[in-house]
Amino acid sequence: MMAIAGYAVENYRAFGERTSIDLRPLTLLFGYNSAGKSALLRALPLLRDSTLGTQSEPLALLSPAARGASFADIRSRFSSSPALSFELKWNKGEIGAVEYIIRDLPDLRRQIIEKLVVFGLGNDRQLIAEWIPQERKGNVSTRYKISNDFRNDLEADIRFRGLRPQLDAPDSSAFVADLFILLDDLFDSFAEDVNWLHALRALPPRREVFTGVPNRVDPDGKGITQLLAYDDLVGGSVIEEVSKWYQTATQHRLEVRRGSFAGKELFSIVLSPTAGAAVEVEVVDTGEGMGQVLPVIGLLSLAKHRQLGKAPILAIEHPELHLHPSAHGALADLFCSVAAGKERPPTILVETHSENFLLSVQLAIVNQRIATESVLVYWVHQSESGAAHIDRIEFDEFGRPKGDRWPPGVFSESVEQSRNLLLARRSRGEI
């Protein structure tokens, strides 16, 4: 099982230029609103859904990560190129990267993979497949010219199930067929590994029927309550981990309450204060932040206790949504704790606006609760034209940004507001 080491996009959404993301155990995306952070993060679940092999088109535009977009919608307006480019990267195994150039054929209402390049770990091109347009009475040609850095050119018919290539006649080119088998295995792992939570998570039901353990948590967080109910049933440690975080951050315990009605087993996820009268309240009746953060804490706890496979990738949007800033530090501490796991920590990609979250990560570095090499930050920003760009930021052992990469004035809003308040008071003669 090998998690991807990174990915790249080009001519995608606001990213006209090639934009490459390396993934660490904890990778953070920061930036102002509408800078392109969400689009950059959602490229990962979009590519994941495109490798499932369940559709004929290369890109799974019906994926929730596409948000109903067409090919024209996701193609960048900051480039004149009619094609999109995506790349997935690994740092172990026989394949180092796979790159796609994808073009839309609006007259035929089809997408085609114009070019596929498979790289070895040494950056050698093990395969280059270039589309050969041919007239086929309205059908799209499946003919490709195949070459690499070691062999002469040949032609073969390649059909794609999403981003998964398959030779029409495997016997015609054994080395290509073998390479596609390796890709299939990598895509199987990739599809299993990626877990995405978008910014607006569903609140847990007041009561629900226990239906068994779901295969995965949905992007809106549905399924996490079933997993927690099962863990509680078997005496696992995940529900305990989740409750521990709630106690630290919100002074409430989280527990599962069970009952039955009309022969059906029901359960509720409840919170009760750790001090004062023990009044249990269903999570759906508590503050919005308590419910919004539940799938986040649940997913992190599942990863920490190795319930999400050997190499999980967690892509999480705005984990701090609706939480009071005082809880952001405890949230970041859990992210750091999971990312600092000694044996095969998960890969976590986070989009956040929270200054407290970032400061807590820097504090964890200083206190040696997470290694500097385990943390990477990308500052996502726009040029004057509106195109999106990224700056890569790493920290030293004291949690300071290396070099001169941190944008000036970032997170200065609270200081500026305090200054404005002081000046306003002075103008009215209070000071």
Image (cartoon, rainbow, N blue to C red):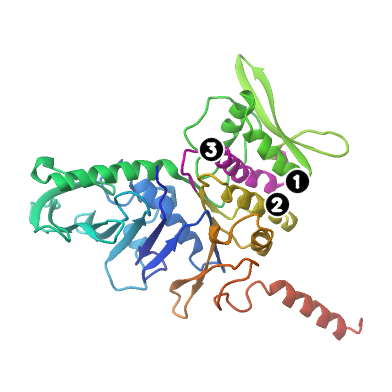
Is 83 on the left or on the right of 92, as rendered?
left
Marks 2 and 3 sit apart, C-alpha to C-alpha, by 21 Å
Discs 1, 3 touching: Cβ within 8 Å:
no
Discs 1, 2 touching: Cβ within 8 Å:
yes
Q: At 43% from the left edge and 74% from the top edge, which residue is drawn?
A: 387
User: Considering the numbered disc 3 on the image, is that residue within a helix, a strand or a loop?
Assistant: loop
Which comes before the other along the chain, label 1 or label 3? 1
Label 3 packing within 10 angstroms: few (<14), some (14-19), many (20+): some
Which comes before the other along the chain, label 2 or label 3? 3
Q: Which of 65 and 107 is in front in this view?
A: 65
Between disc 1 and disc 3, the foreground one is 3
Which comes before the other along the chain, label 1 or label 2? 1
Q: Is residue 236 above or below residue 109?
A: above
The question of residue 195 being in magenta is answered with: no
Q: Nearer the viewer, residue 129 or 272?
A: 129
Residue under circle 1? 248
Image quarter of residue 304: top right
Is 417 on the left or on the right of 150, as rendered?
right
On the image, the x and y values in percent for residue 256 come to: 68, 29
Q: At 59% from the left edge and 51% from the top edge, which residue is drawn?
A: 340
Q: In this view, does 317 lie above or below 253?
A: below
Q: At 13% from the left edge and 42% from the top edge, which residue is drawn?
A: 168
Magenta part of the protein: which range?
Answer: 285-313
Marks 1 and 2 sit apart, C-alpha to C-alpha, by 7 Å
- Name the outermost residue toward the top: 263
The question of residue 304 being in magenta is answered with: yes
Is 425 on the left or on the right of 135, as rendered?
right
- The answer to whether residue 245 is visible is yes
- Mainly helix, strand or loop, the magenta region? helix
